[in-house]
Image: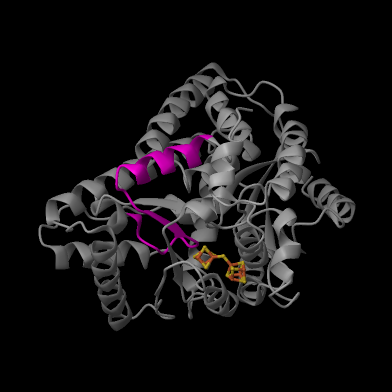
């Protein structure tokens, strides 16, 4: 790992505590990732990113800031990257996926808050994540109650803009979301000092669409009977996509997809024949939350698809790039983003349709519906999801977990029994 101490110091980070995080991550990554056999060579890039996860990209962001660019930190896949990029800004995901940050979050939040929110707030307050220190502005959204209240704490000493999400998907809600995007664009223009033009917005729409298409190509390879890549590896790619440069992300994903397509043609698989194919649905898994994938893929099964925001909800559907005026473009962006089916919407039948469609496309043998403890939205929707899967003859296992390892053995026992039941 290169030496970034001076940079972290300048960012006002708590170096002593951060050292503890740096000490555990390589072992966790080695045990989970580097122990896999026959990985695609293209994964070297993502391994390199993880090895210097608090160094390489943060240093790039700081360089960009020196040249006058602004960095926007986001927490949800509904916040449109296109608008920020059109104003020459940079987007970085900020969701926390490590138990390491949870205790600092619990100092100010109720314990009965989901780990994702506690870790995100803890990463900021504990001063142990450079991305939280670098972001010039945070962009929140009104998805769940826990997040809404967390913005009030996170926004105390950083400029915070909150996007008001509709909770339904009627025509008037889509129109409202288009208005909200337009308002966000005005905030971004003022904050960056750069005007958004139809041409610049169209370039940004195309850039992000290319990234989505490249991620979709990687996912497409997982539909093959012989799996050329593990679920763990694809999860890592999705997690890093949230904060990498979008053009580089597309380039690396396309190069990997070339390799995966060749592997499929050559009949190369990273799992032995007959390995059961699992789809995960539910709450997102922010980096470095690899817990469930690791347990599943060391319990005799393979994860072939994630119907989560660190999976298909992130890249499916493109923004229509044929519009020529800003108002039409904001509307096109609103339509694409309102096509994401998060449990914060009611009714949310589109999500059940997605899950049934994906189960067929990825030829899954069973579904694991995962809920991050204390996420009331996905927990409640789990009832409808599991009913629909059973009605369609698809075996499903519902589980609830958090970022700790305390339930790992119990989960392993349940997952092994589920995989065995799949025959
Ligand atoms: S679009 S899933 S990224 S809101 S797990 S913080 S919902 S209590 S993360 Fe999400 Fe956007 Fe929806 Fe996706 Fe709240 Fe639930 Fe925690 Fe969650």
Identify the colour scheme used: one colour
State yes or no: residue 78 in magenta: yes
Numbered range of the magenta stretch: 56-81
Q: Residue at x 52, y 50 (%)?
A: 131
Q: Residue at x 54, y 16 (%)?
A: 266
- Image quadrant holding the C terminus, namely top right
Question: Which of 54/326 is in front?
Answer: 54
State yes or no: residue 340 in magenta: no
Question: Does residue 226 appear in the picture of this structure?
Answer: no
Among the 4 quarters of the image, the one containing residue 44: top right
| Horizontal side of residue 110 vs 330, given as left or right | right
Among the 4 quarters of the image, the one containing residue 52: top right
Question: Does residue 303 appear in the picture of this structure?
Answer: yes
| Horizontal side of residue 183 vs 22, given as left or right | left
| Horizontal side of residue 373 vs 42, given as left or right | right
**How far from the left and from the top, in percent, is residue 41?**
56, 20
Q: Residue at x 31, y 48 (%)?
A: 69
**How far from the left and from the top, in percent, is residue 367?**
67, 55
View quadrant of ligand 1: bottom right
């Amino acid at each position: 790992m290169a030496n970034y101490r001076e940079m972290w110091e300048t960012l006002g980070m708590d170096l002593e505590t951060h050292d503890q995080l740096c000490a555990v991550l390589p072992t966790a990554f080695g045990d989970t990732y580097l122990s896999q056999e026959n990985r695609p060579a293209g994964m070297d890039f993502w391994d390199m990113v993880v090895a210097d996860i608090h160094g390489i990209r943060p240093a790039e962001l700081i360089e960009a800031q020196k040249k006058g660019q602004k960095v926007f930190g986001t927490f949800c896949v509904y916040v449109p990257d296109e608008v920020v990029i059109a104003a020459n800004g940079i987007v970085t995901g900020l969701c926390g996926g490590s138990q390491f940050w949870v205790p600092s979050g619990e100092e100010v939040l109720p314990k009965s808050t989901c780990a994702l929110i506690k870790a995100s707030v803890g990463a900021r307050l504990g001063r142990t994540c450079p991305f939280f220190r670098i972001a010039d502005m945070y962009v929140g959204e009104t998805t769940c109650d826990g997040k809404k209240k967390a913005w009030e704490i996170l926004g105390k000493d950083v400029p915070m803009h909150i996007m008001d999400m509709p909770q339904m998907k009627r025509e008037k809600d889509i129109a409202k979301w288009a208005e909200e995007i337009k308002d966000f664009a005005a905030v971004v223009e003022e904050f960056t000092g750069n005007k958004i033009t139809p041409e610049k917005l169209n370039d940004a729409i195309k850039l992000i669409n290319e990234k989505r298409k490249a991620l979709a190509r990687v996912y497409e390879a997982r539909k093959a009977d012989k799996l050329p890549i593990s679920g763990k590896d694809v999860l890592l790619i999705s997690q890093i996509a949230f904060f990498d440069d979008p053009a580089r992300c597309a380039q690396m994903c396309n190069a990997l997809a070339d390799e995966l397509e060749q592997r499929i043609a050559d009949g190369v698989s990273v799992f032995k024949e007959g390995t059961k194919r699992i789809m995960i649905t539910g709450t997102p898994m922010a980096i470095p939350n690899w817990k469930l994938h690791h347990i599943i893929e060391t319990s005799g099964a393979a994860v072939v698809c994630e119907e989560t925001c660190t999976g298909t909800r992130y890249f499916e559907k493109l923004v229509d790039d044929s519009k020529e005026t800003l108002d039409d473009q904001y509307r096109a962006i609103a339509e694409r983003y309102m096509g994401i089916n998060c449990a914060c919407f009611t009714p949310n039948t589109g999500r059940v349709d997605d899950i049934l469609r994906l189960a067929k496309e990825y030829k899954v043998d069973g579904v694991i519906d995962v809920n991050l403890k204390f996420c009331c939205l996905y927990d409640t929707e789990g009832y409808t999801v599991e009913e629909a899967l059973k009605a369609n003859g698809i075996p499903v296992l519902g589980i609830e977990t958090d970022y700790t390892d305390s339930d790992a053995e119990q989960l392993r026992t349940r997952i092994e029994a589920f995989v065995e039941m799949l025959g």
